[in-house]
Image: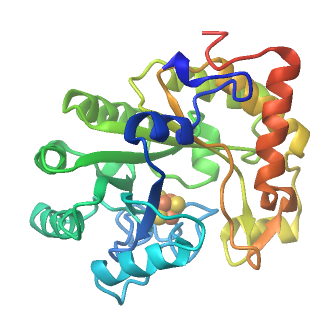
Amino acid sequence: MKHLMNHEKHYITFNNYLKDRFHDKVFRVSLNAGFTCPNRDGLKSTKGCIYCSNKLSGDFAGDVLDDFSTQFKKGVELESHKWQSSTYIAYLQAGTNTYGNVEQLRKIYNEIININKFIKVLSIATRPDCINEEIVNLLKEINEKCEVWIELGFQTMHEATSLFINKCYTNQDFEYAINLLNNAGIKVIVHIINGLPYETKEMMVETAKYLNQFNLFGIKIHMLHVMKDTILGDLYLKEPFKLLSLEEFVEITVEQLRYLNTNIVVHRLTGDAPRDLLIEPIWTLKKFIVLNEIDKYMRKHNYYQGDLC
Ligand code: SF4
């Protein structure tokens, strides 16, 4: 996919991938199926990941009280002033969206892909420990009707950090899930977080190098958001720990990109946090500036995605 890089963007952006693939503006609509999470309901833990909000990381997802068609319609209306589109990705974002029995999941996925014919992709966010053979067989079945992407949380490869953030799954869980999904031909996007407490730049770059050995379709790199009403937020307010500056985030992220193959699409380099809930870092609200700084830094040093791998 090297042809998707250009003078301006030295990495494979999600937008360029979508334009190349669909020749249309593609709009992602976040839906909410009301799933909980094994890291919340007591199966693994009741605390959740320490940065997780009470909306289970789905702060911009639809209203669970609405049916999927209504959620979809409302999501489209919200954005229709920005652009018109006839290509959509339905995104199950909040909670763990493969955490249920197969019959229940089949009904939900089918209902969503049948909302209308303009939904070209069903993107499903989940945890590696909620992927097994039965679920993958179902995903394969759905994938034959509408393309399925699986978004796996991973955050870090480092065990000490994983324990600290109470992630409650291991690298082995991740490897098992990704191999099953790869073998089934399901596209996988992995999420990582930069700036987790006590991680060094080297550790964050190591996580990117580790991921590069798998067959990933995409990656989302987030800066850690410290939000109100989370365990992390309480820890931070009691005893603030060091967070990355914008300059550090840019430097680390660019180095990670340089270790990633050019067949990996960079779905995101910035995250969304509700403004009223974000404690720090405030610079993350200026997404345009963050992306600009990354572009400037790569151009200045003539760095490209994949030039170190
Ligand atoms: S896995 Fe996701 S939904 Fe579950 S606790 Fe962690 S961040 Fe929240």
Q: Answer with the quarter of the image where residue 137 lies.
A: top left
| 109 lies left or right of 47 | left
Picture mark count? 0
| 144 lies left or right of 200 | left
Residue at far bottom of view: 65
Q: Which residue corresponds to the image point at 37% horizontal and 62% vertical from the top-left?
A: 96
| 297 lies left or right of 183 | right
Q: Which residue corresponds to the image point at 13% horizontal and 61% vertical from the top-left?
A: 102
Residue 261 can be seen in this image: no
**Image spot of residue 182 (x, y percent):** 27, 29
Residue 225 can be seen in this image: yes
**Type of colouring:** rainbow
Q: Which residue corresponds to the image point at 41% horizontal and 22% vertical from the top-left?
A: 214
**Image spot of residue 289 (x, y percent):** 84, 49
Quarter of the picture containing the C terminus is top right
**Image spot of residue 54 (x, y percent):** 55, 77
- From the viewer's side, name the closer residue of 37 and 60: 60
